Structure formats: C-alpha cells, structure tokens
Image (tube, helix red, strand yellow):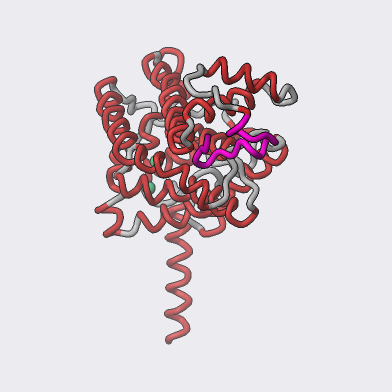
C-alpha cells in the first residue's frame, strides 16, 4: 500500500506485507490496530496515524486537518464575541469603541463574505498544502515532536510573522495598494471578531504568506518542523487575529500580562485612526519605527517633522 506523503516504514514495518487488510477499515479499527502495534504512542498519535491510514492520500488527510481546524477555530472563537455583542448590559463596559456596536445584520453580511473567502481562496491553498509540506520537508508522521520544541518553534513563528506583517501591512497602506487591496479590510472602523479575515482575496494571499511562509521557511532550513506544530501555530495566530479585532479589552486580556503584546486596543486604534499600529502580534516594530497610532503619537510625529523642517531651513539659510 503506497501512500503519497505518509511513510509507514518510518514506524519500522513493511506495510505491503503486514497491512493488506487496512482497506475499508473504520477509524476506530485503525486506531485499535495502531494501539496494539505501537502501545508507546499516545492516543492522539494513534488517531493521527489512523487518519492518514484511513484516507490513504496525504493531500486529502492533510487538507481535511488544516481546513477543518481553521473553520472550527475561526467560527468557534468568533461565537463568544458575537454573544458578548448581544449582551451589552454585561459586556459594553469592556468595549473599546462603545458607541459602535455591530448589528446582527452587519455580522451576517461579514460571515457570508468570510465563508466565500474561505471556500474560494483558502480551500485551493489548503489542497496545495500537503505538496508544500513535502516540498519544504515538513513532517506529517508519528510520533509527534516534544512539546518544548513545538513551543520554541511557535515562538519563532510569532516573531517572524509579526515582522513580515508589519512591513507588508505598512506597504498595503500605500495609496494605490490601499485603494486596490486593503480598503476592504478597513470597512469597519470599529472592528469585531468576525472582521479579522474580512479582506480582499489578494490581501488574504499576501498576509497569509507570513503565517504559512514562516513555518515553511523554518522547515526548509532546519528540516525539523511537524505539521502538528504548523496547525497549532495557525490556531494561535487565528486566536490572536480574532481577539485583536474583537473590540473588547478586559482587565485580564493578554496585553496586560505579556509586555509588548499587541492586543485589541492596539489594533482597534489601527482601524480607528487608520495610520499606525501596522504590526500583528507585538508592539515593538511600531514603537521602533515611530508608527504608533493615535492622536498623541500623531501630534508627536507632527512636532518631530516640524523640528526637522526648522533645522533644515536653518541649515540652508
Ligand atoms: Zn490596515
Ligand atoms: Zn484589522
């Protein structure tokens, strides 16, 4: 049984001779088979193996994992924010721009657009993801890597993506690109969870490259990135993007606990003031480059510009 992209032999046995009867077996039967054969693996690892053995196609097995994890995380995380929006008596006090609550009709329009983008733009990319894993040397086999390695790599992906996002997002605010590509994302001056992926297909591709490209690049260089790490990373990045657009800032929000973490107040200001706060997860790129959003930062920038102009006028006199 040759299986595209999933190498049974790494688990130390020859599939063609010992697994002739794996066809037409259920997930549970395959998982029990894995449990008997490799009792040292965790139940999660046994089911992961069973998933690939069931589909016998890397493209389908990887595609299903990446597509459904994306959909479940996206709508699963947006749902609590929609509930919060429908209960203003409890949650309005935590809303950053409390005069601009999204109506149910606005949220429904946004949901339809998101589904269209997910099925038309993201689905083809997801189908292509397994060949990309093979091309860049990403691992889909069991056993999984140690959690410490997974955590370290996800930390690196956060830093890489944030850097890419800062510069690409800043470029998207350049006039012609803004009008043609990025304007759609800025339709909501007071964002809400669902608006996180409300963007033109080109923007989805351009900014998505930072999310997907970071683990692919890291995998190509080190040869040591697992698909589970990529799925965990994309999940955390989705949670970050949805929370950043939620419009709510709680006393227990992550930004109060992690220094330089962006958070919702940070990205809310990007949508409100339009200039500044271009980074995704952290604040330091904008602080370093002098592009913090808001009236105070804007006044400071104008004052600096005025001083520079004065200095150059004095020089030329
Ligand atoms: Zn923007
Ligand atoms: Zn945004």
Q: Position of residue 188 (x, y in %)?
A: 31, 36
Say whether residue 210 is left or right of residue 18.
left
* Count of numbered badges drawn on the protein: 0
Return the residue found at the far front: 17
Residue 135 visible in the current orientation = yes
Instruction: Based on the picture, tell me whether residue 237 belongs to the magenta stretch.
Output: no
As rendered, which of 144 and 172 lies closer to the eye?
A: 144
As rendered, which of 236 and 20 lies closer to the eye?
A: 20
The C terminus, quarter of image: bottom left
Q: Residue at x 59, y 23 (%)?
A: 47
Say whether residue 72 is left or right of residue 21.
left
Q: The magenta stretch spans which residues? A: 1-17
Q: Position of residue 43 (x, y in %)?
A: 65, 20
As rendered, which of 272 and 35 lies closer to the eye?
A: 35
Residue 81 picture quarter: top left
Q: Measured along the vertical axis of the image, is residue 138 above or below residue 52?
A: below
Return the residue found at the far right: 40
Residue 247 visible in the current orientation = no
Q: Position of residue 76 (x, y in %)?
A: 45, 22
Q: Residue at x 53, y 50 (%)?
A: 216
Q: Residue at x 56, y 25 (%)?
A: 50
Q: Position of residue 248 (x, y in %)?
A: 46, 28
As rendered, which of 277 and 104 lies closer to the eye?
A: 104
Q: Residue at x 35, y 41 (%)?
A: 124
Q: Measured along the vertical axis of the image, is residue 36 above or below residue 68?
A: above
Instruction: Based on the picture, tell me whether residue 8 belongs to the magenta stretch.
Output: yes
């Amino acid at each position: 049984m040759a299986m595209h992209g999933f190498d049974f032999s790494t688990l130390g046995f020859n599939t063609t001779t010992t697994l002739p009867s794996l066809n037409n077996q259920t997930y549970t039967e395959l998982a029990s088979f894995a449990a008997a054969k490799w009792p040292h693996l965790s139940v999660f690892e046994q089911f992961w193996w069973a998933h690939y053995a069931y589909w016998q196609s890397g493209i389908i097995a990887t595609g299903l994992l990446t597509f459904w994890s994306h959909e479940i995380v996206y709508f699963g995380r947006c749902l609590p924010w929609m509930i919060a929006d429908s209960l203003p008596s409890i949650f309005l006090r935590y809303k950053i721009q409390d005069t601009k609550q999204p109506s149910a009709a606005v949220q429904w329009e946004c949901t339809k657009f998101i589904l269209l983008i997910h099925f038309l733009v993201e689905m083809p990319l997801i189908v292509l993801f397994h060949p990309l894993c093979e091309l860049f040397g990403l691992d889909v086999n069991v056993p999984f890597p140690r959690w410490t390695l997974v955590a370290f790599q996800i930390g690196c992906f956060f830093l890489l993506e944030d850097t890419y996002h800062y510069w690409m997002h800043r470029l998207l605010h350049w006039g012609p690109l803004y009008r043609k590509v990025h304007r759609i994302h800025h339709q909501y001056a007071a964002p809400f969870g669902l608006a996180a992926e409300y963007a033109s297909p080109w923007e989805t591709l351009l900014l998505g490259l930072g999310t997907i490209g970071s683990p692919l690049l890291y995998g190509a260089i080190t040869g040591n990135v697992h698909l589970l790490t990529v799925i965990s990373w994309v999940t955390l990045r989705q949670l970050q993007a949805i929370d950043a657009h939620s419009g709510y800032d709680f006393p227990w929000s992550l930004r109060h606990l992690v220094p330089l973490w962006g958070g919702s107040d940070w990205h809310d200001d990007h949508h409100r003031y339009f200039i500044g706060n271009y980074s995704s997860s952290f604040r330091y790129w904008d602080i370093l480059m002098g592009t913090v959003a808001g009236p105070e930062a804007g006044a400071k920038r104008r004052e600096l510009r005025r001083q520079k102009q004065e200095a150059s006028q004095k020089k030329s006199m």
